[in-house]
C-alpha cells in the first residue's frame, strides 16, 4: 500500500462574467444570489483561483477533492462551464455539490448531473477508490427558501452512509467523507447549517471514518467528531477563489497526506494559503493516527 496525496478545495464560485444571464433565469431565488454576486465578484477572483490550482498541480496530488459551490446560481450554463473547467484539470477530481449548485429545483442532467464523470456511482453517498483510500461523497445540498442556505443528508442517505462506512471499514480502507455543509452546528449560523448534523455525527460515532472534508463557511477550520477509533478530523477550507488579508479566509487548500500505519492510517493535514502579496504559505501540519476498524484511541500530534 502506498502513500496517497489528496488536495481539498471548495467554494470556487467560478465567474459569471462570460455567461449570458437571461431575465427569466432570475425569476426565483437566483435573483438574490445574482445581486449578491455583484458584490462578491470583487472577492472571488479568477486570478486567485488560478494561483490555487497551479499550487495544487505543483504538488502532484493523486486526487483533488472539491466540496461544492463550483457555481453561483446553479444555472445550466454555469454547470456546463464548470464541467469544461473540470475536464481541463491536470489531475483526477472528485466532486460533491454545494448549496449554490442546487439553488433552485432544476433538471439534474442539465445542472449538477453534468459533473457525473467526477462523481462515483449514484445514488449518494457514492464511493471512489484511490489506492487504499475510499472517497465517500455525500449530497447535503437542496433548494431552500430565500435567505436560507441550510442543508441536510436525510434519513435514507444516512442509512446508506452507515452501510458504506461499515463495508469500507471492513475492507480496511481509509474512509474520507466529502460533504459541503460543515457537520458541526457551531461552525455556522442555523440558517446556513447542516440541519441534521446530529444524524451525520451518529453515523461517524457508530461506524467510524478517518477524515471528513467540507466547505461552505468560506473559513478554514479544523475540528473533530468522536468515533470508535478516536477523534475523526473535520477539515473545512476557505473559498479557493477568495482574496482576503485574513489568513483564515484567504484562498486556501488542504494538502492531505495519507500513509498506511500498523493496520491503520496516518493522516497529515497542511493548509496552503494564497496571500494577497502573491506568496503561498503553509501552516504547520497536524497529524492524526487511527487504527483501522479498531476501538483503540487515536493519537493527535503537531510537530514541534
Image (tube, helix red, strand yellow):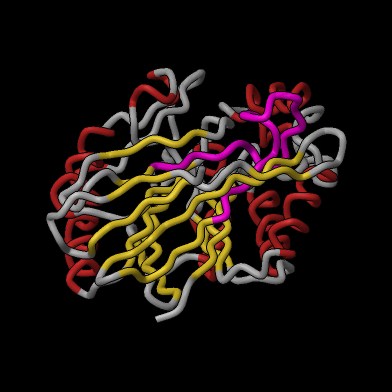
Q: Is residue 206 magenta?
A: no
* Residue drawn at x 12%, y 55% as measured from the top left: 295
What secondary structure prevails in the magenta region? loop
Question: Which residue does the image show at 26% across and 33% down from the upper left?
Answer: 196
Q: Where the N terminus falls, by quadrant?
A: bottom left
Quarter location, residue 209: bottom left
Which residue does the image show at 42% across and 68% down from the upper left? 259
Of residues 71 and 216, the one nearer the viewer is 216
Is residue 302 positioned above or below 40 on the image?
below
In the shown orientation, is residue 269 left or right of residue 140? right
Quadrant of residue 120 within the rendered picture: bottom left
Residue nearest the viewer, comparing 261 with 173: 261
- Which of these two is toward me, 17 or 252? 252
Camera-side residue: 77 or 87?
A: 87
Magenta segment boundaries in residue numbering: 234-255
| Number of callouts | 0
Q: Is residue 13 visible?
A: no
Give the vertical position of 194 relative to 172 (above or below).
above
Percent across and percent down for residue 28 are 57, 28
Residue at 66% from the left image edge and 45% from the top image edge: 282
Confirm whether the magenta stretch covers residue 254. yes
Residue 156: where, in percent of width, then height? 20, 50
Q: Position of residue 171 (x, y in %)?
A: 22, 75
- Answer whether residue 108 is visible to the viewer in this image: yes
From the top left corner, tell me how far across and down residue 232 is, in percent.
30, 46
Amino acid at each position: 500500500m502506498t502513500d496517497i496525496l489528496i488536495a481539498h478545495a471548495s467554494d470556487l464560485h467560478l465567474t459569471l462574467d462570460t455567461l449570458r444571464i437571461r431575465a427569466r433565469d432570475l425569476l426565483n431565488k437566483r435573483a438574490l444570489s445574482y445581486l449578491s454576486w455583484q458584490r462578491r465578484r470583487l472577492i472571488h477572483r479568477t486570478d486567485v483561483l488560478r494561483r490555487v490550482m497551479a499550487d495544487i498541480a505543483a504538488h502532484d496530488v493523486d486526487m483533488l477533492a472539491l466540496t461544492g459551490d463550483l457555481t453561483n446560481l446553479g444555472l445550466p450554463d454555469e454547470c456546463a462551464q464548470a464541467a469544461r473547467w473540470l475536464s481541463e484539470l491536470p489531475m483526477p477530481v472528485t466532486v460533491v455539490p454545494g448549496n449554490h449548485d442546487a439553488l433552485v429545483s432544476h433538471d439534474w442532467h442539465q445542472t449538477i448531473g453534468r459533473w457525473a464523470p467526477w462523481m462515483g456511482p449514484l445514488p449518494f453517498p457514492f464511493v471512489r477508490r484511490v489506492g487504499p483510500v475510499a472517497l465517500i461523497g455525500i449530497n447535503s445540498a437542496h433548494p431552500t427558501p430565500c435567505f436560507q442556505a441550510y442543508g441536510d443528508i436525510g434519513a435514507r442517505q444516512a442509512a446508506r452512509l452507515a452501510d458504506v462506512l461499515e463495508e469500507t471499514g471492513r475492507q480496511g480502507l481509509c474512509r474520507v467523507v466529502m460533504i459541503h455543509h460543515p457537520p458541526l452546528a457551531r461552525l455556522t449560523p442555523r440558517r446556513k447549517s447542516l440541519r441534521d448534523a446530529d444524524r451525520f455525527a451518529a453515523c461517524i460515532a457508530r461506524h467510524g471514518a478517518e477524515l471528513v472534508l467540507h466547505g461552505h463557511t468560506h473559513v478554514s477550520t479544523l475540528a473533530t467528531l468522536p468515533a470508535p477509533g478516536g477523534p475523526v478530523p473535520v477539515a473545512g477550507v476557505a473559498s479557493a477563489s477568495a482574496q482576503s488579508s485574513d489568513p483564515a479566509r484567504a484562498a486556501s487548500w488542504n494538502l492531505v497526506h495519507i500513509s498506511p500505519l500498523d493496520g491503520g492510517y496516518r493522516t497529515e493535514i497542511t493548509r496552503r494559503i494564497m496571500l494577497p502579496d502573491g506568496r503561498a504559505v503553509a501552516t504547520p501540519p497536524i497529524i492524526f493516527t487511527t487504527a483501522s476498524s479498531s476501538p483503540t484511541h487515536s493519537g493527535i500530534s503537531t510537530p514541534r
